[in-house]
């Protein structure tokens, strides 16, 4: 591991974890990539490598899928009782909680996010998700169904449905909430009795690897959870196309989501997609302005804007536009930008050089096309992938900064006239992931909520997540819902059983 200025502050167990090259998990064993290749994962605040990680590709994916298939068809996972499966998942959650500090530090080192946020949000939410899903194992039920069958008059039937695990599942996840995205995917797959091959993002593999170690310790049988680290174009593409994978669950860009869908067509595997967003956040003049200003700032600047549901289009009613823009800009200026391991940091670096270029490219394009930065608008410093929290005004609906997902701490503030005007503006996007509404008029809020094409609508709050609340997108923001009981449908098949009894 390269010597970094933060190394001395790190937990001993984290240092130990980073002292050894990271391997792939197949059939309960940690192995090198078949090719022997490795790649470095970086600390985005220093641009220094943290540790070498095995670079899995198609050959490793084949082995991992084989292990997952064996574990699904023959292993104890499917035959153990639902209660036993639930206890193993709960135990994993307990172990994660015991390793909270380790997870938080790995997440901060690998992704760049503030350690305070990793401790308070990423890790506890992931633990809670596993506990919530552990509770579902014993409640995945079919139904008894009265049938009439007009062409067999007088016959009697007993008909019921079973909900069975879909099988071997490929899960491809992004870098913005590495551990939490792994939990969102693995929780329901394990609860329903599926087996998994997980591919973490190349930028942030570390917390998934620690999770793999703890899953074995929790007694989740060999082959149930396999983890192949590597690149999207090789390992990810091989998983999406694999003929022996029954389902692929993907979170990431809409562009790659479409590639995953095409690759999945080969064997018509089931597909669920959690993709990008360009979420409208609407502030009415009758809102509590102070709360709305703080909420709007947090909606875009939380996790450095690297949230699929970031409130990136801020719509403000005409008569309070200047006041709200000024307030959000003041909030932006107050944000302490720095290395995530510094406990005082409120915003860390972007995850990679690629993201830095992408976000700076969007800011430049907006400014060139005539937008004005009330605050921010450029990179911060020269080392580490830091950018300034940015508020843009004077945009028009055609600009790239208004239409496309930036995935950085950049908000476009846009005035609107009235409740009618806002519906068409808010829905004027190919995305439909989330939306925010700030008003004291609760009837107006719910009327607008019904008209917005978004999978989640937050009223007088933003970025509120809970394991019990489904999350996912309308339009090009995705297919299916994660979390809540809705997600169980993505990981189960329904079997109808019909018996003639008279
Ligand atoms: P991405 O390319 O869509 O990556 C997401 C995951 O897909 C990663 O594990 C990636 O692997 C993998 N992948 C890449 N190409 C693949 C392929 N051809 N087949 C199968 N898997 C593939 O996202 P990104 O490049 O990390 O970020 C780009 C943009 O995606 C962001 O700016 C943002 O707009 C969006 N994004 C959205 C979310 C969300 O939660 N909705 C999260 C992250 C990013 P590698 O990382 O190893 O390449
Ligand atoms: Mg990294």
Image (tube, rainbow, N blue to C red):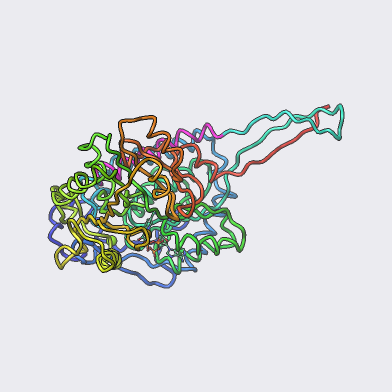
235 sits left or right of 79 in the view: left
Estimate the x, y position of residue 429 in percent, counting from the top left.
42, 54
Q: Residue at x 47, y 47 (%)?
A: 221
Residue 33 versus residue 347 in the image, above or below: below
Judge by depth and name the residue closer to the eye, 417 or 178: 417
Estimate the x, y position of residue 222 in percent, counting from the top left.
47, 51
Residue 285 versus residue 210 in the image, above or below: above
* Magenta part of the chain: 118-140
Tell me where residue 46 sits by quadrant: bottom left
Q: Residue at x 36, y 51 (%)?
A: 213
State how many labels appear: 0
Q: Residue at x 22, y 55 (%)?
A: 391
Residue 132 among magenta residues: yes
Judge by depth and name the residue closer to the eye, 195 or 340: 340
Estimate the x, y position of residue 298 in percent, counting from the top left.
25, 45
Tell me where residue 381 sits by quadrant: bottom left
Q: Quadrant of the N terminus?
A: bottom left
Residue 33 seen in the figure: yes
Residue 29 among magenta residues: no
Q: Quadrant of the C terminus?
A: top right
Secondary structure character of the magenta stretch overall:
helix
Residue 223 seen in the figure: no
Q: Quick check: which quadrant has ligand 1?
A: bottom left
Residue 245 versus residue 153 in the image, above or below: below
Residue 55 versus residue 470 in the image, above or below: below
Estimate the x, y position of residue 366 in percent, counting from the top left.
28, 64
Tell me where residue 464 sits by quadrant: top left
Judge by depth and name the residue closer to the eye, 337 or 248: 337
């Amino acid at each position: 591991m390269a010597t970094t200025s933060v190394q001395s502050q790190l937990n001993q167990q984290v240092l130990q974890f980073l002292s050894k090259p990271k391997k792939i998990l197949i059939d309960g064993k940690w192995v090198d990539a078949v090719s022997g290749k490795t790649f470095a994962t970086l600390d985005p605040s220093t641009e220094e490598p943290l540790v070498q990680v095995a670079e899995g590709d198609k050959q490793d994916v084949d082995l991992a899928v084989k292990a997952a298939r064996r574990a699904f068809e023959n292993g104890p996972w499917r035959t153990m009782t639902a209660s036993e499966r639930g206890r193993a998942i709960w135990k994993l959650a307990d172990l994660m909680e015991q390793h909270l500090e380790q997870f938080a530090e790995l997440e901060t080192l690998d992704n760049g996010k503030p350690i305070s946020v990793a401790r308070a949000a990423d890790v506890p939410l992931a633990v809670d998700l596993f506990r919530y899903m552990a509770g579902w194992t014993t409640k995945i039920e079919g139904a008894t169904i009265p049938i009439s069958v007009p062409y067999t008059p007088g016959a009697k039937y007993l008909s019921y449905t079973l909900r069975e695990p879909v099988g071997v599942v490929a899960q491809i996840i992004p870098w913005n909430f590495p551990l939490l995205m792994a939990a969102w995917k693995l929780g329901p797959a394990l609860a329903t009795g599926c087996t998994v091959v997980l591919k973490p993002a190349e930028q942030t593999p570390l917390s998934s690897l620690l999770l793999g170690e703890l899953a074995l310790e929790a007694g989740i049988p060999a082959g149930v959870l396999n983890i192949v680290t590597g690149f999207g174009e090789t390992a990810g593409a091989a998983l999406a196309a694999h003929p022996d994978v029954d389902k692929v669950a993907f979170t990431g860009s809409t562009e790659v989501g479409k590639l995953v869908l095409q690759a999945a067509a080969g064997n018509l595997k089931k597909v669920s997609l959690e993709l990008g967003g360009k979420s409208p956040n609407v502030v009415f003049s009758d809102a509590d302005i102070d709360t709305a200003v703080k909420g709007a700032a947090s909606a875009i600047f939380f996790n450095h804007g690297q949230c699929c549901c970031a409130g990136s289009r801020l719509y403000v009613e005409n008569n309070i536009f200047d006041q709200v823009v000024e307030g959000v800009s003041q909030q932006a200026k107050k944000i302490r930008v720095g290395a995530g391991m510094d406990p005082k940091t409120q915003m860390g670096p972007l995850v990679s050089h690629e993201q830095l270029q992408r976000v700076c490219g969007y800011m430049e394009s907006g400014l060139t096309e005539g937008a004005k930065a009330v605050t921010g608008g450029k990179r911060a410093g020269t080392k580490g992938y830091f950018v300034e929290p940015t508020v843009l005004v004077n945009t028009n609906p055609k600009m790239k900064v208004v239409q496309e997902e930036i995935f950085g701490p950049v908000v476009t503030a846009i005035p609107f006239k009235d409740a009618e005007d806002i519906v068409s503006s808010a829905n004027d996007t190919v995305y439909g992931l989330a939306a925010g509404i700030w008003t004291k008029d609760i009837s107006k809020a719910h009327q607008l909520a019904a008209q917005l094409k978004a999978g989640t609508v937050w009223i007088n709050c933003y970025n509120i997540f809970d394991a019990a609340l489904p999350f996912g997108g309308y339009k090009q923001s995705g297919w299916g819902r994660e979390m809540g009981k809705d997600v169980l449908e993505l990981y189960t098949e329904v079997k109808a059983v019909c018996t003639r009894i008279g």
